[in-house]
Amino acid sequence: MKVGVLGWCLAALALGWVAPEPAAAAEDPLQVQKIVLAEPELGPGQEQLVQISLANPTRRLVRAGLRVEVRSRSDRLLGKPYTRSVSLTSFEEQRVFFQLSAPPTPGNYHVQVEVLDTAFKKPLLDGSPVFRAPFAVVGGGGSLRPLPGMPATASPETPRAAFTPPAGLRFEEPDLLWEDFKVASYGLLLEEPLHIQATLLNVGGDIARNLVVRVEYVNVRLPKQVETISETTITALAPGEQRELEFDFRFPDNTLLGDYTVSLIADAGNNVGESDESNNVVRTARPISLSTIRLLFPEPGFSFQETGLFLFRWDSKRYDEFKVQLGVDPRFDDREKYFDIPQGDKWTSDTEVVPLAGELPEMAKGLLLREKKDVIHWRVLARSSSTGKQGFSEVRTFRLELEEPAQTAPSGPAAAPPGGGAPVGGR
């Protein structure tokens, strides 16, 4: 008996049989979301930073190899390819960075990206797509612009639908951080350069572009009068990248002497959106003392022994004749409370002096006992032999450890006998 098509369909429905759905198209294990170049234009041989945004739309771990090439307008490979292995967990998004060297000749070029297997031999994506991002090398004759019609997506030969990341998924923003901030000297003569070293890091998840680094100083007594030492622009700083910076600066001759605070500011132009803006500024741990006479020894609070050696040492580039002044008056207003070394009209051309025994400890000891003080203040008075101009250093203090006077044994009936016990004649 022949059964018609309708009969077969009715029988199948009665048995609960359903025809299978067509097989779904295989999903690529990795998607290239975007390619971003730090510089659309740059000079010959300069460094180009390439950011490749990847996404894993599957539920499994995916490993792949990225091959990046610099190619000419005619699609000729320039130099050797750059390769890197990557791995993405389920539904992970990741950004991979390459540092490339621009060609030495001005012209229009492009960066080409391929996704391969981990052996860098076979294409990993369906259709073997090639992704491109254009840039120009400029110099000499003028500016060259990237060619139009070359978006940073799949090539026209292998069109693909753009990958849309899940809603609410975001990469971390850049985060700039200072480390290893060093100042060569916290005691600076006016004619000497201020040398500063520091390391700037990007500890965030994205490129920081066009960030302005500024170095400022301010006198602690005039906190509103901020002056700029240096300002430089870093075009791009990739996540995990660090930049070691050095600055040399000489204060102008008319700069007010005293204590200064120096600050390093990352992103001074506020061009970078960061996950944490609070760590963009680093300041000197203590004020930098700017003077024309730098005191070297003794350090503040130093203690001399009464029977020991005494030495004072300083430095100056502006003056060539000196006196050391010591006393118990911290402002050196009362001439009866301090004395000079050398005394009288004498000066020394040396930048250190060893006082005579009659000056230290004797004269200093006499001032301490007479004024009932426990510290000695000292400073350096200096002058230029050619111009006659004079100047003073800062004032520092030191201690003079005086020997205790010998105790005279008591006599008479109240004296204690040798070995202790009650006084003779006592009860």
Image (tube, rainbow, N blue to C red):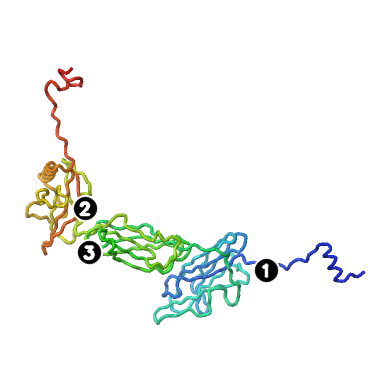
- Point out which mark residue 296 bears: 2
**Amino acid type of disc 2?**
Leu
Question: In the rendered image, which residue does mark 3 sit on?
Answer: 255
Question: In the rendered image, which residue does mark 1 sit on?
Answer: 25
Looking at the rendering, in which quadrant would you find the C terminus?
A: top left
Q: Position of residue 255 (x, y in %)?
A: 22, 64
**Amino acid type of disc 1?**
Ala
Residue situated furthest left in the rendering: 345
Q: Secondary structure at mark 2?
A: strand
Looking at marks 1 and 3 on the same chain, the residue that comes earlier in the sequence is marked by: 1
Identify the image quadrant of residue 59: bottom right
Residue situated furthest right in the rendering: 1
Nearer mark to the viewer, of 1 and 3: 3
Work out how far the residue at label 2 is from the one at label 3, CA to CA, in angstroms.
Answer: 22 Å
Residue situated furthest front in the rendering: 224
Identify the image quadrant of residue 155: bottom right
Q: Position of residue 123 (x, y in %)?
A: 60, 68
Identify the image quadrant of residue 323: bottom left
Instruction: Tell me if residue 220 comes above or below residue 44 in the rendering.
Output: above
Q: Position of residue 197 (x, y in %)?
A: 33, 60
Looking at the rendering, in which quadrant would you find the N terminus?
A: bottom right
Work out how far the residue at label 2 is from the one at label 1, CA to CA, in angstroms.
Answer: 80 Å
Work out how far the residue at label 1 is from the one at label 3, CA to CA, in angstroms.
Answer: 75 Å
Q: Is residue 310 visible?
A: yes
Crowd band around label 1 with a 10 angstrom C-alpha radius: few (<14), some (14–19), many (20+): few
Crowd band around label 3 with a 10 angstrom C-alpha radius: few (<14), some (14–19), many (20+): few
Image check: 146 left or right of 295?
A: right
